[in-house]
Image: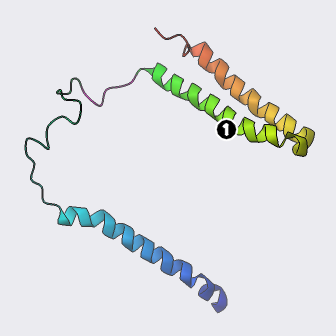
């Protein structure tokens, strides 16, 4: 039992150092900072005009549907290229597993289409 504990000792030391450094990096800025706000620091950043409306306003649901649509096609392409290259080695099991994957993505695409994410007004 003692050998098991001694084999995990370096991991515990590493975790203690990581937690300590993380805590120091989180606390140090609050202890070292000098807050001196002025007009330049409080001015609008880069855009040049005062902000209008509340920055915490809700987005239209179509924005999220378009984001989901992008993720669907991005995942499809990211997994389709390696699959196509290795198709000769993975055989029919690999082929049908990719067909199931593409079927799930197609269901997601049809959901987006039904919700009207492709019809932007």
Camera-nearest residue between 61 and 85: 85
- Residue drawn at x 11%, y 42% is 40
- Residue drawn at x 49%, y 77% is 14
Residue 1 seen by the camera: no
Q: Quarter of the image containing the C terminus?
A: top left
| Local crowd size for mark 1, using a 10 Å CA cut-off: few (<14), some (14–19), many (≥20) | few
Magenta segment main secondary structure? loop
The mark total stands at 1
Task: Tell me the element at label 1.
Answer: helix
Q: Is residue 52 left or right of residue 58?
A: left
In the rendering, at what x and y percent does residue 49 appear? Answer: 18, 26
In the rendering, at what x and y percent does residue 26 appear? Answer: 31, 63
Residue 97 in which image quadrant: top right
Residue 57 seen by the camera: yes
Residue position marked by numbered label 1 in the rendering: 78
Instruction: Report if residue 56 lies within the magenta region.
Output: yes
Q: In this view, does 32 lie to the left or right of 110?
A: left
In the rendering, at what x and y percent does residue 82 appear? Answer: 75, 42
Name the residue furthest right: 92
In the rendering, at what x and y percent does residue 87 appear? Answer: 85, 40
- Residue drawn at x 62%, y 33% is 74
Q: In this view, does 20 lie to the left or right of 94?
A: left
Residue 103 in which image quadrant: top right
Region rendered in magenta: 54-59
């Amino acid at each position: 039992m003692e050998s098991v504990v001694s084999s995990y000792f370096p991991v515990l030391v590493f975790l203690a150092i990581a937690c300590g450094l993380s805590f120091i990096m989180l606390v140090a800025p609050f202890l070292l900072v000098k807050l001196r706000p002025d007009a330049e620091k409080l001015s609008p950043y880069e855009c040049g005009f005062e902000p209008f409306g509340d920055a915490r306003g809700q987005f239209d649901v179509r924005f999220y549907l378009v984001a989901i649509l992008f993720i669907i096609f991005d995942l499809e392409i990211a997994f389709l290229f390696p699959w196509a290259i290795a198709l000769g080695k993975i055989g029919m099991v690999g082929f049908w597993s990719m067909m199931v994957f593409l079927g799930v993505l197609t269901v997601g695409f049809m959901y987006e289409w039904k919700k009207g994410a492709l019809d932007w007004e």
